Amino acid sequence: MDKQTILRQYFGYDSFREGQEFLIDSILEGRDVLGIMPTGAGKSMCYQIPALLMNERWGGITLVISPLISLMKDQVEGLNQAGVHAAYLNSSLTQGQYRKALSLASQGRYPIIYVAPERLMTGEFLDFAVHAPIAMVAVDEAHCVSQWGQDFRPSYLKITEFIDRLDTRPVVAAFTATATKEVREDIIDLLMLRTPALITTGFDRANLYFGVMTSKDRYQTIKNYLECHPGESGIIYCLTRKTVEEICSRLKGEGFPVTRYHAGLGDEERKQNQEDFIYDRSPLMVATNAFGMGIDKSNVRFVLHCGMPKNLESYYQEAGRAGRDGQPAECILLYSGQDVRTNQFFIENNQDNQELDEITRRMIAERDRERLRRITFYCATNDCLRDYILRYFGEYRENYCGNCSNCLSQFETKDVTQTAQSLIGCVESCRERYGVNVILDTVHGANTEKIRGYRMNENPFYGKQAAVPVHLLRQVMNYLLMHEYLTLTNDEYSIVKLAGKAADVLSGKEKVEMKLPKTQPHPAKIAGRESSGGSGDRASRRRGTAAGVDLTADQQALFEKLRALRMEIARAEKVPPYLIFSDRTLTHMCLLRPETREEMLKVSGVGEYKYEKYGERFLACVREEGSGSY
Ligand code: ADP
Ligand code: ZN
């Protein structure tokens, strides 16, 4: 067999995606590789295909090191579904099961074995490994080896020690979705990759729509959204456990198929709820950021953030759980000014780094404040959101994507020089002593105790912009901070200071112009399509579609039937529905309406093995629907 045949027969796909072929070929040539690709790009295929080829050619076995039990389980089930023998070795097995798996592994039963890093240096495992023809060690989530990232795992440092124990050094293939230079260098150094073939595919996830909006009543906004996306699976992230509880119970009360997840629940319940979500028994998950590591569910159609996360790294990771099947999916952040304060509180009261010394702790807090600021600007910007994210990760492109709430809204350029002069003037005249809110309140002319206490009611700029609504003042303030007219101190007080371009604005030498929404920025109600603005248009485009592709009413009806059949099979076989066929595959079936085996095998995601298992039933379902509609 060759790689193309394997892709077709086992996985049911016709062509490789960006980077896959290069990495597969390099591995087959015996070269180490490092693949840096965003979530959903198809990293697994890059090691699974050469693993199968090396196994077929000379019985070589591939070990896949993976940090999380749930991730391993999912991958192994997926492979088994595709007709590949694979196993995992981790602490979820009983001693008996573990021995059994190892013994089958020694007999060469599994071309691919997933193993937890903690197992590598144990006597039993070593005993197996030194006697087995290990062809490759594939390191998944390779950034876990680096202390720069957020997911450092000391046990990843044992990987090289393990490799040293083997008689023949296997190919080492590392994969991650984390792009920063420090992490990349750490991976190469600490895993001792030998002149690896390196590929970094872009970080863009073109199928994801990004949106930011504020909303007076977040619960209502979420509810509207869910009502417009019936049957779809999605995650609603909240900042606190309390919000999770609140939103989950209200949604449940209104009959939505929802479950919850946060660190305050018992192990048993967390496990159960996670499974309910993965198996689509409760396709809606309300959770804190404790949820998600290792969630490989491919048919998540939206990720709503009820509140701004602490930084863009977390946001992109969490939002990125949408649309892993490559089908259109939506990532919407519901933002309010309070979120900044909540996150500031988390930073100032961070208990995670108790064992660190004072200086390091202070450095971490500073870094966190800076990251928080950058995501606050994400929520405030009127420029392309995708562009903002990609720039943050060091990728530069045009400031237009056509698939985010800003690109789809109408803006006009306005001269805000006078407002800017008042804000900057106020900062200067109070001798750079106060934070954003005091400045805004002063310029707006708020008559509060705090303002009087600071005697800002005597400031020459007091009330100067009383006619400008506060939210607009805030937008201008954010613009000035983003574009280096003003800056904030990087301590817990966040004092507004003058920056490089301030003087020219005050002297009238420089005009300040910014993009503002054309219709008054009363933030679009996500699902209340009555509102103006791009997100409404966009949402209605997606309305009534199953997996984000526009289906006709007939096709949509077929999709629902296929989805029900998938659920029925999933229940009977006790596997997650998306492992049987992805949403994308079902959608493709609706478009092609296959009537024969041959036609069914043309559907993306239907390989021969899966055809043998499920093909006839899905064919029957398509045929039945066809005859019914005429
Ligand atoms: P990653 O590990 O990079 O996050 P996965 O390996 O889980 O991504 O792949 C994401 C999805 O893309 C999976 O559903 C996978 O089957 C699919 N996929 C991978 N390669 C291809 C391909 N060449 N053509 C179509 N789909 C693919
Ligand atoms: Zn855009």
Image: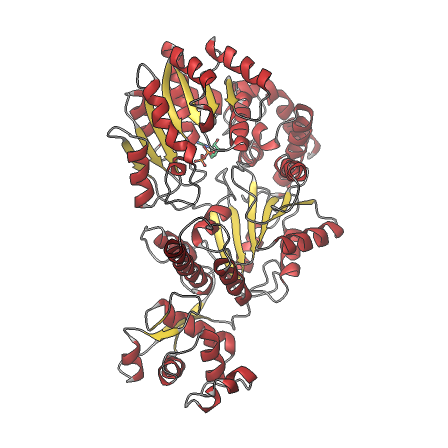
Number of marks in picture:
0
Q: What is the quadrant of the N terminus in the image?
A: top left
Q: Nearer the viewer, residue 487 or 555?
A: 487
Location of residue 255 in the rendering, given as x and y in whole percent from the top left corner: 74, 49
Residue 439 makes an appearance in the image: yes
Instruction: Look at the picture and state if 551 lies above or below 418.
Output: above
Q: What colouring style does the render use? A: secondary structure
Q: Nearer the viewer, residue 536 or 314?
A: 314
Q: Nearer the viewer, residue 423 or 541?
A: 423
Instruction: Look at the picture and state if 384 lies above or below 430.
Output: above
The residue shown at (28%, 24%) is 31
The residue shown at (52%, 73%) is 520
Q: Nearer the viewer, residue 395 or 459?
A: 459
Location of residue 288 in the rendering, given as x and y in whole percent from the top left corner: 58, 49
The residue shown at (45%, 74%) is 436
**In which quadrant of this rendering is ligand 2 seen?**
bottom left
Q: What is the quadrant of the C terminus in the image?
A: top right
Q: Is residue 298 left or right of residue 256?
A: left
Q: Is residue 11 left or right of residue 231?
A: left
In the figure, residue 581 lies in which quadrant?
Answer: top right
